[in-house]
Structure formats: structure tokens, C-alpha cells
Image (tube, rainbow, N blue to C red):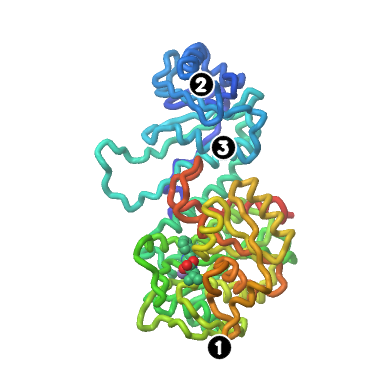
């Protein structure tokens, strides 16, 4: 699996006395305040910085920067002074952004760059350093494996060597080891989402998930005969119009106590969603290669948990299918019997994600008796209308789990906003011919989708995250320039770390 193929080399850490070369990035607080080691490294060039700041009216405000080429008196090609505002106001979650912003100031052709991890109060703490490194790594991500030509003057990304100057090298390295696992998890998720559907069809997705065995995850791949035997007809119905066979992959990481029930993460993995017989309009349909972002997040998370040896038992379960129109495809009006025994009337074959999740949720719940289930799915366009791209929709039967996710969301800036569920909405999916229908009409489309899922989770604490807005076509941020964000990996890693590790 090409982890880290599309990013910088891994950052290294060095003391502040490290010899300088290439690009140097230093942080500066409002009032042109630097840390002691930064002042020392700038040496006589401190005066140059003062004059440049005065002429640019740079004061160290957050978002501002001074870019000085070939600074006299320093062996550098470029010195970047990055404004961070008032240092005391920086919260833990700001350091990942800071790392991203710093990496953004390094030209892509640079071979060598040093980031000074220091504020006026002194060296950053090891955890803060690790966040800076994470932000830098995520910012550098590009998905360009299918580009064979470059425009004139366009240089190939140099895979810059990033050195971070820190107070304690061993402490920074130790903190980074855990963050590195998360960085790789996010990159893995982004890669899977960006990959086109002619390359990443269900079997290939299952193969890539199976390569988590390398980091110690137990992986079980269920093929079509196995799924038939289990009675996952709802999931199989979605895939029956595709030339590619469906799969379910169960990943298991046992880092906790033997007797502890696992946490369960479930992902929608529609490798391509044409809509099926209820076919989608052509405009923008190419984005539906990313309709497996929920499953990609689960794979990225399982990588992160295993690679950092999280002290927890976790299950990742993904339903992987392709939704195609075909002579063999399912029709509106068809009725399928789910693994749970409940029947669903298909009204619209484009409401396929819930059909996939219904069977996987039931399977995980009955087979693995988890402490909770969290599913992630690019489930509805309606959630984008409601929340835009800044918050994922959160639907749940458990207030405590919601609170924890809300907090983890604020800590990682992968934020969630709770949406309602209730019997009045549930009634909207009652069917004339079966136990339920797969759409509830034009009103509250994200809610009726969640109500269908709720019918397959029983009493287990459960959260459904509708990530259609947050996962794809991502707005450009300090830590992501790619179409896919890898949304959810950092959020769920944070949840696990804060509440479930022994
Ligand atoms: N995968 C789509 C939802 C989606 C839309 C994800 C845009 C990302 C961006 C989902 O399978 C779908 O087609 N939902 C329908 C449901 C409708 C038919 C009830 C929708 O949202 O229109
Ligand atoms: Mn669809
Ligand atoms: Zn879909």
C-alpha cells in the first residue's frame, strides 16, 4: 500500500543548535516576539528581520508572514517569519494548523527546510511539536500518481526533508511516533477516496484493507457466497447490477483486555454510486468515486489504532459494493429481506447506502456485541444542504456518546452537529408492501435515512455520522489541499484516546 508515497519524507527532529540549510521557518508572536533559541539562530540577521517587518508592517499577527529571500548573514535560501498572534492564546488544536501553515510557506521545490518549534515562552511541548509535524505532513499531501506530464516550469514535488528544531529530541520523537500513526491513517483514507473507481472496485478495496495485516490487524474478507449464506440480501441487492462482486471486510485490533467488548466502526463503501436504475444526472457524477469515504475512514482509523498500538479492542467493518444500472440491477418496487429478517421495499435505487449499512450494522451488533457502534457514510445530499461542509450530521440514541464526539470534534476541528430522530420521522419510512421503504420523501432526507439505520441497531449505543459534506470536495485548509479530507480519522482516534483506552 503506497502509504506516504504522496507526502513528504517523514520529519526528523533536531536540537535548536542544528546547522541551518535551505528554508528556515520561525514563529513570531504579536509585538515581534521570538523565542530565545530563535533569536540566537537569527543572530545578526535579527536586525534584517526588524527592518523587513517595519517595511511590510508585519507585527506577528496570526495569518501574516514575512518571506525573506537569501537573508544576508544566514546560510539559507529563504527565511520565513510566520505570525501566530498572541502566543498565550494558542490552544492545543491550533498547533496542527500551525504546522500546516508552516509547511505551506515552504516552496515545493525546496529540498531542505527547518521549522523552529518555539514561541516566546520557549520550546513547544512534545505533544505540540507532534501536532506541528502532523499538520506539516497532512499539508504536504498530494494525489498525483496519475499525472505523467508536467506543465513547463512545474517542478515535481521535491519530497522536502522537514527538520523540526525542538527542546528535547527524544521526547519529540516519542510523541511523534503516535502522531505518525494518525498521519498515515489520514493519508491512507485520502488515497483510497481519491482513487478512481476503475482502480478501486470492491475486490481491490478489500485487498487494500487486508494489507492492514502488516500492522497487526486481523482481517476477514467475506465474499458473495459467504454474504449469501449470512442473508445479507439488502447489501447484495445494491451490488447485483455491477460486474464487480460485493465484499464485506471485518478488521479487528485487539490492544485491550481480552474480556473487554470491542468498539465498532462501520463504513459505507460504495466504490461508485451511479444511482443504479434511479440513475443520477451526469453533472458531477464523477464525485461518486468518493462514495466509499466512510469505509476509507474506518480503514484509516484501524491503521492508526494498530500502528500506535492503542490499548483498546476495536472492530472496523465495511460494506463494499458498486451501485450500477444493468439488466441484473435491482428495480424500484423490489423487496429485499435483510439479514435481520426485516424487509425493505426499494423506492429509489439511489438510496443505496442505508441498504448496505442495514446489514453490516446488524451483523456487527449480533456477532460482536460491541460497546458502541459508530457508522460513517456519505449518505445524503440533504446533509450538505443542511450543514454545508463544516460539520458532519450526527444522529444517535445515546447522549453520552454524542457529548464525547462533540468534544473530540472541537479538539480536532472535525466537528459534528447533532440532528434529531423520533417516531414521527420513523413513520415516514413505513411501507405499504414491506416492513419499511428505503426513502421517506422530500422532507428531512438525512433524518429518514438515519431512521432506517436505527431499525438495525437495537439497544446498542450508536452514532451515525453523515459525512457527505465533510469528506468530499473539501474546502482548502491549512492542513488539506486535496479533494478528499480523510475526515473522521483524527476525530475517532481522539475519541478512543480520550475515553476508551485502559
Ligand atoms: N451517495 C449519495 C449521497 C451523496 C450526495 C454523497 C452528494 C456525497 C455527495 C447517496 O447514495 C444518495 O444518492 N442519496 C440520495 C438519497 C435520495 C435518493 C433519497 C440523495 O441524497 O439524493
Ligand atoms: Mn446513491
Ligand atoms: Zn451513495
The residue to which callout 3 is attached is 132
The residue to which callout 2 is attached is 58
> Quadrant location of residue 488?
bottom right
Is 249 left, or right, of 170 in this rendering? left
Q: Nearer the viewer, residue 304 or 455?
A: 455
Q: Nearer the viewer, residue 246 or 447?
A: 447
The kind of secondary structure element at disc 1 is loop
Mark 2 touches mark 3? (CB < 8 Å) = no
Measured in 3D between alpha carbons, the distance from the residue under mark 1 to the one under mark 2, in whole angstroms, is: 69 Å
Q: N-terminal of the two: label 1 or label 2?
A: 2
Find the residue positioned furthest to the bottom: 433
Q: Is residue 303 visible?
A: no
Q: Which mark's residue is nearer the viewer, 2 or 3?
A: 2
Quarter occupied by the N terminus: bottom left
* Coordinates of residue 415 in the picture (x, y in percent): 60, 51
| Residue shown at 59% from the left, 61% from the top | 465
The residue to which callout 1 is attached is 433
Callout 1: few (<14), some (14-19), or many (20+) C-alpha neighbours within 10 Å?
A: few
Relative height, residue 232 to residue 100 (above, below): below
* Coordinates of residue 394 in the picture (x, y in percent): 62, 60
The kind of secondary structure element at disc 2 is loop
Amino acid at each position: 500500500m503506497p502509504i506516504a508515497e504522496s507526502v513528504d519524507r517523514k520529519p526528523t527532529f533536531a536540537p535548536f543548535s542544528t546547522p541551518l540549510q535551505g528554508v528556515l521557518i520561525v514563529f513570531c508572536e504579536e509585538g515581534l516576539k521570538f523565542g530565545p533559541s530563535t533569536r540566537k539562530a537569527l543572530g545578526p540577521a535579527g536586525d534584517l528581520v526588524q527592518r523587513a517587518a517595519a517595511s511590510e508592517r508585519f507585527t506577528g499577527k496570526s495569518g501574516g508572514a514575512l518571506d525573506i529571500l537569501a537573508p544576508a548573514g544566514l546560510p539559507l535560501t529563504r527565511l520565513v517569519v510566520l505570525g501566530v498572534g498572541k502566543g498565550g492564546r494558542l490552544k492545543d488544536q491550533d498547533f496542527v494548523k500551525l504546522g500546516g501553515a508552516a509547511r505551506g510557506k515552504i516552496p515545493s521545490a525546496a529540498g531542505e527546510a527547518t521549522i523552529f518549534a518555539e514561541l516566546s515562552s520557549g520550546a513547544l511541548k512534545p505533544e505540540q511539536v507532534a501536532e506541528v509535524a502532523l499538520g506539516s505532513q497532512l499539508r504536504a499531501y498530494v494525489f498525483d500518481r496519475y499525472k505523467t506530464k508536467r506543465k513547463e516550469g512545474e517542478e515535481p514535488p521535491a519530497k522536502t526533508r522537514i527538520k523540526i528544531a525542538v527542546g528535547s529530541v527524544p521526547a519529540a520523537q516519542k510523541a511523534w511516533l503516535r502522531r505518525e500513526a494518525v498521519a498515515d491513517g489520514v493519508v491512507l483514507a485520502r488515497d483510497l477516496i481519491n482513487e478512481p473507481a476503475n482502480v478501486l472496485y470492491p475486490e481491490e478495496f478489500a485487498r487494500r484493507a487486508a494489507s492492514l495485516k502488516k500492522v497487526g490487524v486481523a482481517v476477514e474478507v467475506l465474499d458473495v457466497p459467504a454474504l449469501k449464506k449470512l442473508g445479507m440480501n439488502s447489501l447484495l441487492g445494491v451490488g447485483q447490477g455491477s460486474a464487480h462482486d460485493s465484499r464485506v471486510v471485518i478488521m479487528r485490533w485487539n490492544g485491550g483486555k481480552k474480556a473487554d467488548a470491542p468498539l465498532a466502526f462501520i463504513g459505507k463503501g460504495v466504490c461508485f454510486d451511479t444511482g443504479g436504475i434511479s440513475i443520477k444526472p451526469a453533472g458531477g457524477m464523477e464525485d461518486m468515486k468518493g462514495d466509499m469515504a466512510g469505509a476509507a475512514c474506518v480503514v484509516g482509523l484501524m491503521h492508526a489504532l494498530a500502528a500506535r498500538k492503542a490499548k483498546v479492542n476495536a472492530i472496523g467493518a465495511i460494506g463494499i459494493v458498486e451501485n450500477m444500472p444493468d439488466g441484473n440491477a435491482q428495480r424500484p418496487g423490489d423487496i429485499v429481506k435483510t439479514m435481520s429478517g426485516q424487509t425493505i421495499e426499494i423506492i429509489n435505487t439511489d438510496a443505496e447506502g442505508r441498504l448496505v449499512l442495514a446489514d453490516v450494522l446488524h451483523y456487527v451488533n449480533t456477532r460482536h456485541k460491541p460497546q458502541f457502534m459508530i457508522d460513517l457514510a456519505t449518505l445524503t445530499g440533504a446533509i450538505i444542504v443542511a450543514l454545508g461542509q463544516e460539520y458532519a450530521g450526527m444522529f444517535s440514541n445515546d447522549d453520552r456518546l454524542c457529548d464525547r464526539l462533540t468534544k473530540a470534534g472541537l479538539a480536532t476541528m472535525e466537528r459534528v452537529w447533532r440532528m434529531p430522530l423520533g417516531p414521527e420521522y420513523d413513520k415516514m419510512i413505513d411501507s405499504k408492501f414491506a416492513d419499511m421503504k428505503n426513502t421517506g420523501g422530500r422532507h428531512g432526507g438525512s433524518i429518514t435515512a438515519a431512521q432506517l439505520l436505527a431499525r438495525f441497531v437495537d439497544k446498542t449505543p450508536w452514532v451515525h455520522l453523515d459525512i457527505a459534506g465533510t469528506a468530499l470536495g473539501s474546502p482548502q485548509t491549512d492542513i488539506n489541499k486535496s479533494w478528499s479530507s480523510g475526515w473522521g480519522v483524527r476525530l475517532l482516534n481522539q475519541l478512543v484516546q480520550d475515553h476508551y483506552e485502559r
